[in-house]
Image (spheres, grey):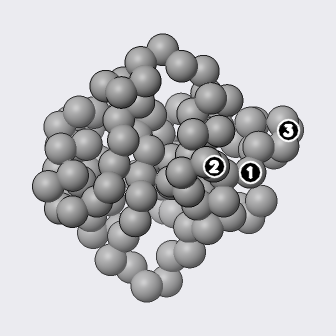
Amino acid sequence: MKLLANENFPESSVKILENAGYDIIAVGHDFAGILDSEIIELAINEHRTIITFDRDYGELIFKKGYRPKAGVIYLRWENFQPNEPGEYLIEFFKSKDIQLEGMLTVIGLDNIRQRKF
């Protein structure tokens, strides 16, 4: 699986996913300051799943028409330790019931919602 971590995704979680064998690009490290639309274009071009804490991706997908085929994971968490998102996602990716392609996946503290685009 190829991932694209938005600037707001903690560096320690990027390292956790990287050490677990995921192909991950960290926007904050490799492309600091680029626009959300440019992040989506990068994800489309490289078929990467975006992982973010930024709620604007729903608007970019459903109102602006961007379609990152590998999907977007929006973590709707407010308080967490920097390593928690990476550890959570490793377990999350093991689930056979979750389809990420063409989906906006919203992960809250007590639920997971998906919307096809």
Mark number displayed over residue 63: 3
Say left or right for 41 vs 88: right
Instruction: Quadrant for residue 23, please give it.
Output: bottom left
Say left or right for 40 vs 5: right
- Name the residue rendered at 36%, 70% in the picture: 93
Q: Which residue is mark 2?
A: 44
> Which residue type carries mark 1?
Arg
User: Which element type, helix, strand or loop, lies under badge 2?
Assistant: helix
Residue 40 image position (x, y, % from top left): 62, 39
Residue 57 image position (x, y, % from top left): 65, 38
- Which quarter of the rendering shows the C terminus? bottom right
Q: Residues within 10 Å of mark 1 (few under 14, many from 20)?
A: some
> Which residue type carries mark 2?
Ile
> Which residue type carries mark 3?
Lys
Mark 1–mark 3 CB contact (< 8 Å): no
**Distance between the Cα atoms at labels 2 and 3?**
17 Å
**Distance between the Cα atoms at labels 1 and 3?**
11 Å
User: Which element type, helix, strand or loop, lies under badge 3?
Assistant: loop
Mark 2–mark 1 CB contact (< 8 Å): yes
In this view, the residue farthest toward the bottom is 96
- Which quarter of the rendering shows the N terminus? bottom left
3, 86: nearer the viewer: 3
- Name the residue rendered at 41%, 18% in the picture: 32
Instruction: Quadrant for residue 61, please give it.
Output: top right
**Distance between the Cα atoms at labels 2 and 1?**
7 Å
Mark 2–mark 3 CB contact (< 8 Å): no
Callout in the foreground (2, 3):
2
Q: Which residue is mark 1?
A: 67
94, 107: nearer the viewer: 94
